[in-house]
Amino acid sequence: MHRTSRAVSRCRRAWTEALESRALLSGSLSGVVYDDLDANSWHTPNEPALVGQTVRITRYVNNQLFESRTAVTGDDGTYHFDDLSAGTWVVNYVPAGGRYLTGYTEPNRFATFPFDPALYREQYFDFGTALPASISGTVFRDLDRDGVRDAGEGGVAGVTVFLDDSHDGTPRHPLGGVDPAAVTDADGNWRISGIGPKNEKTLHRLGFYHFDQIASWTEEEIAWVDDHLKFNGRIV
């Protein structure tokens, strides 16, 4: 009787498991939204921070939107973005309540991660904002015709006051619509809101921030400001 031996071979299979793809979390970003009182895009201690303002950060890959987030400023006006992956992000302020950015014609700021603070100027990710300005006054009965309102000279209600943008002496614009205007109230007071940021910044650059400064202009100062604003004699 013969015995035969049989070799048994065993095969071991190698199992591989795909790893979950994960983004490289490489940094965070923060800044401040504030009321830029002098319209110079530089935050100083006297300029209040703004709560409840929205800032958006967006990343594009191959010119396609890859990710977008928003953050709302807290009580100290600060916004925060955390866990930002490597790459270049676009940061911008989302206008609200009529506010506009001061100082910059280009509203976007760019942040590249991994982040090197030395590559960015101070306050680069802060956003200075402002509200459109307004102008106001009173129409009154100048009984002694001296150009100054004295006691007993009452206001005149129902008078239309307008900014003569069309230079035609009427509140109606020749291209349609009307020039900015207001009607005096029962006390003769009026206010026109929405004076744009361009003229406001020009006035700030010239050193004027308050209406009492404008009221005290001399004839020479009126001519000088008129030349800068290109108002063609509309400052009276």
Image: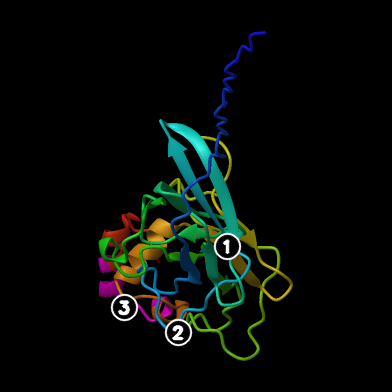
Q: Residues within 10 Å of mark 3 (few under 14, many from 20)?
A: few
As rendered, which of 177 and 218 lies closer to the eye?
A: 177
Residue 146 visible in image: yes
Q: Residue at x 57, y 20 (%)?
A: 9
Marks 3 and 1, the one that precedes in the sequence: 1
Q: Residues within 10 Å of mark 1 (few under 14, many from 20)?
A: some
Q: Position of residue 179 (x, y in %)?
A: 54, 49
Can you say whether 102 is above or below 62 in the image? Answer: below
Image mark for residue 192: 1
Determine the secondary structure under disc 3. Answer: loop
Q: Is residue 30 magenta?
A: no
Residue kind at label 2, given as amino acid type: Asn
Question: Which portion, as a residue range, is magenta?
Answer: 214-224
Determine the secondary structure under disc 1. Answer: strand
Image mark for residue 105: none
Q: Residue at x 53, y 44 (%)?
A: 22
Q: Position of residue 193 (x, y in %)?
A: 57, 62
Can you say whether 99 is above or below 58 in the image? Answer: below
Q: Residue at x 41, y 50 (%)?
A: 108
Image quadrant holding the C terminus, namely bottom left
Q: Position of residue 158 (x, y in %)?
A: 70, 63
Q: CA distance from mark 3 to mark 2?
A: 30 Å
Q: Which residue is mark 3?
A: 218
Q: Quadrant of residue 156?
A: bottom right
Q: CA distance from mark 3 to mark 1?
A: 23 Å
